[in-house]
């Protein structure tokens, strides 16, 4: 295939209006999909190079090991190559690939079993016998030290705390709050009821809040970074 | 008025604007009347925002380059037509 027929090269260079942008993306998707279905080698390479970074970063976010993320990368593209003929274009190809990546990650997490399923009860809100909230201000909070200018360290700290959550809750939090799926979609992806998903999400957020609490006041300065 | 525990049970739907009007009003009223829950909601919302920002940030693993051998290995699996 000639380099000039690379679908990515047909993208408009000026900033298009929203509807033009959507049409442009759809048009690029169509060209890429047609080319993949024709079995063009260059298009497979374009696909892997264009969507590979997103696949790898998603895999790294969901999986705890670099080697699992690399396996997931391979398995995702195998599934994409095998499924391209059946792709119905109900979403963009990027959205479809991201969903495949997440499914591959979840299969891998399930295969690892309940290795990271420690209890989070101690991180959840507490209530007295009247149903009143018991204050949970950490005694360490006032003495916690973080450099408010060190944003990079702060972000790493937050990511590390997300990683401390058991997989059940971490996955729910990633799907809903980081990857932007609705609670209903996140429930469907995990194969659980909507009620169970809401409970899981609330527990995940509450537990993360507790983990961040010792320095939350300082981190709030970074909420809009 | 709702207890804090009852409000806590409604929190996900309340913040998603997914409650019927009456329940939404009861939750709103509870937050107005309860300093502990108002503080909890404020920090809970900050937690959501911090999580999103930490993972969306340019220095998150998002910008990782894909090792060339990984790309080549993926392409080697491609379906032969």
Image (spheres, coloured by chain):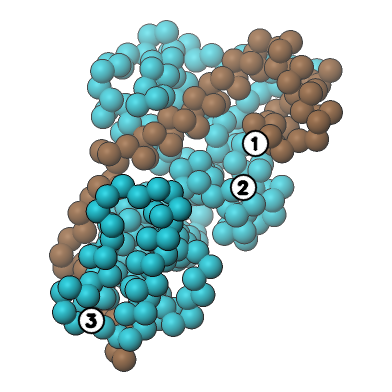
Chain colours: A cyan, B brown
Q: Quadrant of the N terminus of chain B?
A: top right
What residue did someone put label 2 on? A183
Spatial CA span between label 2 and label 1: 9 Å
Along the viewing direction, whichever of A25 and A219 lies nearer the viewer: A25
At 23% from the left edge and 50% from the top edge, which residue is drawn?
B64
For this orientation, the residue located farthest to the top is A142
Can residue A128 be seen here? The reply is no
Q: Position of residue A103 (x, y in %)?
A: 48, 63
The chain ID associated with circle 3 is A
In terms of image quadrants, where is residue A154? top left
For this orientation, the residue located farthest to the bottom is B81
Spatial CA span between label 1 and label 3: 45 Å
In the rendered structure, the answer to whether residue A130 lies left or right of residue A36 reads right
Asked whether the residues under the numbered discs 2 and 1 touch, taking CB atoms below 8 Å apart as contact, a structural biologist would say yes
The count of marks equals 3
Which type of secondary structure does the marked residue at label 3 adopt?
A: helix
Which type of secondary structure does the marked residue at label 1 adopt?
A: loop
Which mark's residue is nearer the viewer, 2 or 3? 3
When the figure is inspected, residue B51 is found, relative to residue A102, above or below; the finding is: above
What residue did someone put label 3 on? A41
In the rendered structure, the answer to whether residue A16 lies left or right of residue B3 reads left
In terms of image quadrants, where is residue B16? top right
Image mark for residue B16: 1
Q: Position of residue A162 (x, y in %)?
A: 43, 38
Marks 2 & 3 on one chain: yes
Give the class, few, some or many, for how many residues have Cα within 10 Å of label 2's Cα (few <14, many ≥20): many
Along the viewing direction, whichever of A32 and A131 lies nearer the viewer: A32
Which type of secondary structure does the marked residue at label 2 adopt?
A: helix
């Amino acid at each position: 295939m000639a380099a000039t027929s690379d679908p990515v090269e047909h993208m408009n260079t000026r900033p298009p209006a929203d509807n033009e942008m959507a049409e442009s993306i759809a048009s690029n998707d169509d060209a890429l999909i047609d080319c993949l279905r024709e079995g063009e080698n260059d298009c497979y390479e374009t696909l892997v190079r264009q969507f590979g970074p997103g696949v790898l970063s998603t895999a790294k976010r969901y999986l705890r090991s670099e080697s699992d993320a690399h396996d997931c990368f391979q398995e995702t593209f195998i599934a994409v190559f095998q499924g391209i003929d059946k792709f119905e274009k109900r979403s963009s190809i990027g959205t479809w690939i991201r969903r495949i990546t997440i499914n591959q990650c979840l299969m891998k997490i399930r295969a690892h079993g309940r290795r990271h399923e420690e209890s989070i009860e101690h991180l959840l809100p507490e209530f007295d016998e009247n149903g009143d909230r018991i204050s949970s201000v950490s005694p360490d909070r006032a003495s916690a030290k973080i450099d408010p200018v060190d944003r990079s360290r702060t972000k790493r700290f937050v990511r590390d705390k997300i990683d401390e959550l058991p997989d059940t809750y971490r996955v729910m939090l990633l799907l809903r709050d980081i990857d932007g799926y609705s609670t209903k979609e996140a429930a469907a992806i995990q194969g659980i009821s909507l009620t169970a998903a809401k409970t899981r999400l609330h527990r995940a957020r509450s537990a993360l809040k507790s983990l961040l609490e010792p320095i939350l006041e300082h981190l709030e300065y970074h909420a809009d970074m | 008025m709702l207890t804090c525990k009852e409000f806590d049970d409604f929190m996900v739907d309340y913040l998603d604007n997914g409650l019927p009007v009456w329940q939404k009003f009861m939750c709103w009223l509870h937050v107005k009347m309860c300093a502990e829950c108002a503080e909890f909601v404020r920090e809970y919302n900050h937690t959501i925002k911090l999580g999103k920002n930490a993972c969306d940030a340019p220095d998150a693993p998002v910008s990782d380059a894909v090792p060339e051998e990984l790309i080549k290995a993926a392409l080697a699996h491609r379906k032969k037509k």
